[in-house]
Structure formats: structure tokens, C-alpha cells
Image (cartoon, grey):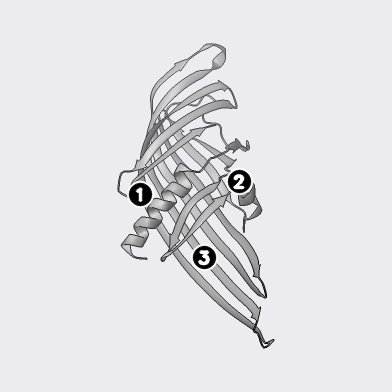
Amino acid sequence: MTSKDHAQASLRFARLALTTLVAIVTTLGATVSRAEDTVAPANQWTVSFTPYGWTPFLNGDQTVKGRTVSIDVTPIEVLEHLERAPWMSYAEARKGPLALYNDLFYANLGIDASAARTFGKAALSASLGVDVEQAIIELGGAYEIAKWRSGGGSSTAIDILGGARYWYQDMAIHLDLAAAGVEPGGLNIRADHAIARAGSVDWVDPVVGGRIRHQLAPGQKLVLRADIGGFDVGSQFSWNALAA
């Protein structure tokens, strides 16, 4: 892809997948070692691993090698068109106020649509297929700048964080057009035309932000997080907000 194509794809995908993705985050349990549910010495590392579910909707324009298509996919349609099992997980290692984390999202889906129209003795049909493979990998660190405890064993902490978020997208567009009709002499005619385009794009966004962690009780925690990124390094600008 040319640098112009890369820029267009980056900007459109940043809008497509970041500013219009709505994440319904459901913690599935499966915590290997609850770093904040148990009292551990400050000089020891504790590790937690959490799988989760993220159901997005996609809305925007995608340009692949000069071909632009509009995509409008609801969360239900995303689930119906998954081509292989997605992977979503969050892992964090903490030692005292310092934490290192990794967030991984991967999904592969295929979307198909078709339409047909009849004009007298002529018929026109079209089918469109869009295959999207995307991955988002975030690596970073967080540092606890404040923490206070309240009654009943609960506590609240504030972290600042920074890291990098890697984006990858591979997209293929398949468009098939078919026309059929009957000539005045009674001869059946048919014409077919197929268009296929495929391309991939990836980039890395620096990310800075903060989060609030409120421990209600062992195994019960509320997290509010927000970050911004891009800064013309990867994409122009991106933002992310999470409540879990």
C-alpha cells in the first residue's frame, strides 16, 4: 500500500475501531492469582490473568487499494459472522506500586450481502463480501500514585499509566456483478464481472492515561480507566474509555 493508502486506512480504521467501538466487558472470573485480593509482601510480584468478552459494533468507511466500502455491523452480526474463535485477555503483574500489563484482542469475521433487481426482461444481481481480521495488542506499565482505605476492608487507588498499543488489520473485499437478459431475437445473454481487493495495515500508538481501582471486597473490584494516544506517531488521535 502507498503511504497515502496507509494514512487513509489508518485514519479510517482508527475511527472505525476505536472511536466507534462500544465494549461490553464481562469478566469471566478465572483469576489465576488475585494480586489485590490477598495481602502480599511489597517486594514480591503477584500476577493476575482475566479473560473477558468484548462485543463491538463497526461503523465507518474502509478504503482498500482505491476501493471504498461502507460498513455498518451490529454486535449481533459480529457474533454471527465470526470465522474463528476470538481471543481477549488481560494480564497484569504487580510489585508494590508498580504494575506491568498486557491486553490482547483478536477477531476474524466475514460479512456477506447480496441484492438483485429486475428491469423488464433483464436482471442484475450483486454480491459483496468483506473479510476483516484485526488484532489490538497493548503493552504498558502503571504506577500507583495514591491509595487510601475505607471501612469494611475496601480501598481506592489511583494509577497513572503509559505504554503502546499495536493495531493490525487485514481486509479483503470481493464484489461480484452479474447481468442477464433476453435479446429481441430470443437469445439469452449473461455478463459477469468480479472485483477483488485485499490489503493490510498496521501501526503503533503511544498511549498515556490513568485509572481508578476501587476494591469492594476480595474478588469484587470496580475499575475506571481512560487514555489517549496516537499523537501523529501512528494514528492522528485515538481515545479509549473503560468501566468494568
Q: Which residue is label 2 attached to?
A: 75
Residue ID at (54%, 44%): 89
Can residue 174 be seen in this snapshot?
yes
Callout 2: few (<14), some (14-19), or many (20+) C-alpha neighbours within 10 Å? some
Badge 3 is on which residue? 173
Residue at left offset 58%, top offset 72%:
177
| Circle 1: element type | loop
Q: Residues within 10 Å of mark 3 (few under 14, many from 20)?
A: many
- Can see residue 37? no
Residue at 58% from the left image edge and 57% from the top image edge: 109
Q: Residue furthest front?
A: 184
Direction from residue 17 to residue 232 in the image, left or right: left
Position of residue 184 relative to residue 229, above or below, is: below
Residue 235, numbered circle: 1
Q: Label 3 amino acid?
A: Ile
The residue closer to the viewer here, 99 or 26, is 26
Q: Position of residue 231 (x, y in %)?
A: 31, 44
Left or right of 107? Residue 142 is left
Q: Disc 3 vs disc 2: Cβ atoms closer than 8 Å?
A: no
Q: Position of residue 189 (x, y in %)?
A: 63, 83
Q: CA distance from mark 2 to mark 1?
A: 25 Å
Sequence-wise first label, 3 or 1: 3
Front tag of 3 and 1: 3
Question: Picture quarter containing residue 191?
Answer: bottom right
Residue at image coords 54%, 11% = 151
Q: Label for residue 47?
A: none
Distance from the alpha carbon under mark 3 to that under mark 2: 21 Å
x, y percent for residue 93: 46, 37
Please determine whether, in this image, residue 196 is positioned above or below residue 58: below
Q: Quadrant of the N terminus?
A: bottom left
**Residue 104, x across and y down, in percent:** 50, 47
First in residue order: circle 3 vs circle 2: 2
